[in-house]
Image: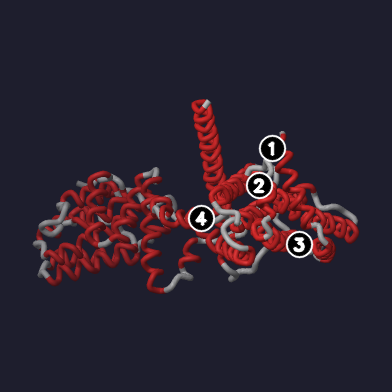
Amino acid sequence: MIVMERVFAIAKLTFVKLREPAFLMLMAVGACLGSVSSEMGTLMFREGNSLVATLIVYKIGEPVLSNFSLIVFVVFIVSVFSGATEIPRDVKSRMIMLILAKPVSRWEYLLGKFLGVLTMGLAFLAVSFSAVVAAHFLKTGSFYPPGVLMRQILLALVVLPCVAISVAVSTFLPEIASMVLAVLYMIAAVAVASIGILVEMLPHSLNAGGAVYSVYYLFPNFIFYFNSFHPFGLVSFALLVYTLSVTAILLWIAWCRLSFRDMV
Amino acid sequence: MRKASRLRGKFSFFNGGWLLFLVLASYFLSDSLLREAAAKGAIDKGLRVSDVVSKLPEGVRDTVERQIDLAATRDALATAKTDRDKINALLCLGVIQGRKEFEEANAKILDEFPDSPEARSAYSFFLLAREGAPRSVSPERYRSYVTRRLPEISRVEMWRLALRRFEEVEYPPEKVFDFFAPVFERPPIYREYEVFFMELAEFAFRNDSRYWEGEAKRLEDACSKGPSLSDIPGGPPEKAATGP
């Protein structure tokens, strides 16, 4: 319990630090964006679009709505910019020495940072999602069906690996470089995501998996988050497990790095 | 004290190791499930692997397409339940792989499914096969297979293929007409046989067999006025099924 108190203290410190006017303005922008985009339809792509777009499924179960996807994209940017800069800034300002001089272990510090940035991302998401739901109610006089709403809430899971990637990258590089690398890594993840699904579609005796999967498993698959599915089914449970495990692996890598690096 | 500390270290290592194992297992399992669901959704949506392959550069495309076809046929062979499906998959595999593999596929069909109506390509492939071929089918065995195992609608093509093969290997004409004895004894008067009897008449003419030429022409005329096999409801009576 004491351990978690320390973790939450670091998280609170991170979150409070981020609660500056710029962030509050960003929240306001999120709310506006949510209300303006409340009546956009299902996230789907026309024929002839990129392969990744073609692979996104929107016919089974509950689909992802375009407005919620747009908000998630903004959250992704916010998460990268805050997640990738927190630790390098602490290292640069020597704040990290001050924190680690106290009875706080490095993994507690890392987890605290992750939770702080995550809380910020989820707060932005909560404000924007609420604005969408409220605007939809005001325009149509009805709420979204519970299944559709639940599916959009599950979309928030994508924030966890995004923040974990940003934090993990930031343990290796200075702030600007980690921001750039985090963005590049996520773009690469989107590009590679289709490979795993295509291999799954190939005949099994082709044995095309080996070399392809060794590249595929280096990146989280973001396509999973945007596919349509039943929000209370096996796929949604698998998505939850996938999110938690990917996040844990990325934080484990960050912890390994943080355990062995100099803080000066 | 030091011992206790080391022990604690070991325990924490084991706890950490198990946790990491659990996390990795969860990751791979959930990823596999999600990938399968995504692939199924993409297939339901109408996306085919061939659509993706067609976007590849020309040099790579043919190789990839061939590998995919090969693997798909291997999968079809592995999951085939009926003799018909197995034979079709074997033949497809042979066609994709090349001449030698096609020969081996036909040999396998002949060995494993000698009585199946779908094995007809193997019989025609190995009829009086060249020396050194993995199998050879004698005219007697071929005729017995055609008359006993094939429906009337499939026989005409087999007779034509046999005639063509006899011409290729210059099989003695008297043996050829002996081979076709069941056709003359109980002639199938169907329109599909018209071309066969015409070819047989030409063969007889080229070999100075006036009697067989006349017989073949007579049957050719009869067939041109006869019904089509496809017009007969429920299929034609299997009158030649009791042949030699």
Q: Which amino acid lies under the numbered mark 2 shown in the image of this protein?
A: Leu
Residue at label 2?
A100
Q: Nearer the viewer, mark 3 or mark 2?
A: 2
Q: Nearer the viewer, mark 3 or mark 4?
A: 4
Residue at label 4?
A218
Q: Which amino acid lies under the numbered mark 4 shown in the image of this protein?
A: Leu
Judging from the image, mark 1 belongs to the subunit labelled A
Indicate which disc residue A3 carries.
1
How far, Cα to Cα, is label 1 from label 2?
14 Å
How far, Cα to Cα, is label 3 from label 2?
42 Å
Answer with left or right where residue B181 lies relative to residue B84. left
Judging from the image, mark 3 belongs to the subunit labelled A
Judging from the image, mark 4 belongs to the subunit labelled A
Q: Residues within 10 Å of mark 4 (few under 14, many from 20)?
A: few
Residue drawn at x 74%, y 43% as measured from the top left: A8
Q: Nearer the viewer, mark 1 or mark 2?
A: 2
Which is nearer the N-term, disc 2 or disc 4? 2
Give the residue furthest to the bottom: B58
Q: Determine whether label 3 and label 2 are within 8 Å by CB.
A: no
How far, Cα to Cα, is label 3 from label 4?
30 Å
Residue at label 3?
A67
Answer with left or right where residue B26 lies relative to residue B139. right
Same-subunit check for callouts 1 and 2: yes
Say which quadrant the C terminus of chain A sits in: bottom right
Which is nearer the N-term, disc 1 or disc 3? 1
Q: Nearer the viewer, residue B237 or B22?
A: B22
Same-subunit check for callouts 4 and 1: yes
